[in-house]
Each structure stands twice: as C-alpha cells, then as structure tokens.
Image (cartoon, rainbow, N blue to C red):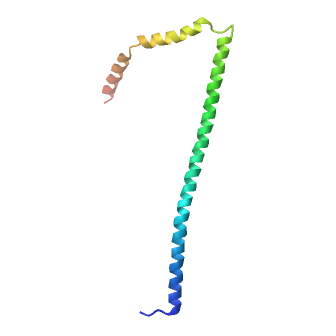
Amino acid sequence: MKLKLRYKILLLYISVSLCILTILGSLLSSALRNIIITTISDNYRKQLEHIDYGLTGFFKNIEYDLETIAQNEWGPGPSFASIGKNIVQFAEEFDFDAIKLLADKLEKQAK
C-alpha cells in the first residue's frame, strides 16, 4: 500500500497534533484538578471562619448577659441559683424507665 506524499503529511500532522493535545490535556487536567480542590477547600475554610465568628459572638453575648444579670442588685438573687438545683433534682427523681416502657408499648401497637 503506497500512500501519496499528501496523505503521509496529513497523517503525520494528525498524529503529531493528537500527541500534543494528549500531553497538554493530561498536564492541564491535573493542574485544573488541583486548582478546583484548592478553591473548594478555601471556600470551606471561609465558611468555617464565618461560623466560628458567629458562634464566638453569640457565646460572648450570652456570657456578657449572664455577668450583667449576676452583678445586678435587682437581679434574681439567691433564688436564681436554686433553679439549677431544682432542675438537677427533677432529673434525678424523674422515672425515665416509664417513658421507655410507654414508648415500647406504643411502638408495638403501631406494628
């Protein structure tokens, strides 16, 4: 099979261009992948910074409010401290087993 010079040159041109495109495509795809991963990680980092800033401000405001309440002479006083004791006492005396039994009974009835 003899090819004319025109077809040989055309075949050589196509093969060289495909090789160049393959090499450039592989190099650019790996570089693009790294850029995309870096961009995504930067976006997540910025979002986490915003969340951290918001939560820090929220808890600082609560801390400031609690300090203000504690220092206020017209504040709740000693009865305010008893609220925490009442909550702990309620949690100790509450019958959680009865709630579990009731939940199991309702679950069995639902089946």
Q: Looking at the image, which residue is at 51% across and 9% down?
A: 85
Q: Quadrant of residue 108?
A: top left
From the top left corner, tell me how far across and down residue 73 is, in percent: 69, 7
As drawn, 20 above or below 47: below
Q: Looking at the image, which residue is at 55% across and 55% down?
A: 34
From the top left corner, tell me how far across and down residue 69 is, in percent: 65, 14
Q: Looking at the image, which residue is at 56% across and 64% down?
A: 28
Q: Nearer the viewer, residue 110 or 31?
A: 31
**Outermost residue, right direction?**
73
Figure quadrant of the C terminus: top left
- Image check: 30 left or right of 92? right
Q: Quadrant of residue 99?
A: top left
- Image check: 63 left or right of 91? right
As drawn, 5 above or below 99: below
From the top left corner, tell me how far across and down residue 6 is, in percent: 53, 90
Q: What is the total number of numbered labels drawn onto the structure image?
A: 0
Figure quadrant of the N terminus: bottom left
- Image check: 51 left or right of 104? right
From the top left corner, tell me how far across and down residue 70 is, in percent: 64, 12
Q: Looking at the image, which residue is at 54% across and 57% down?
A: 33
As drawn, 47 above or below 71: below
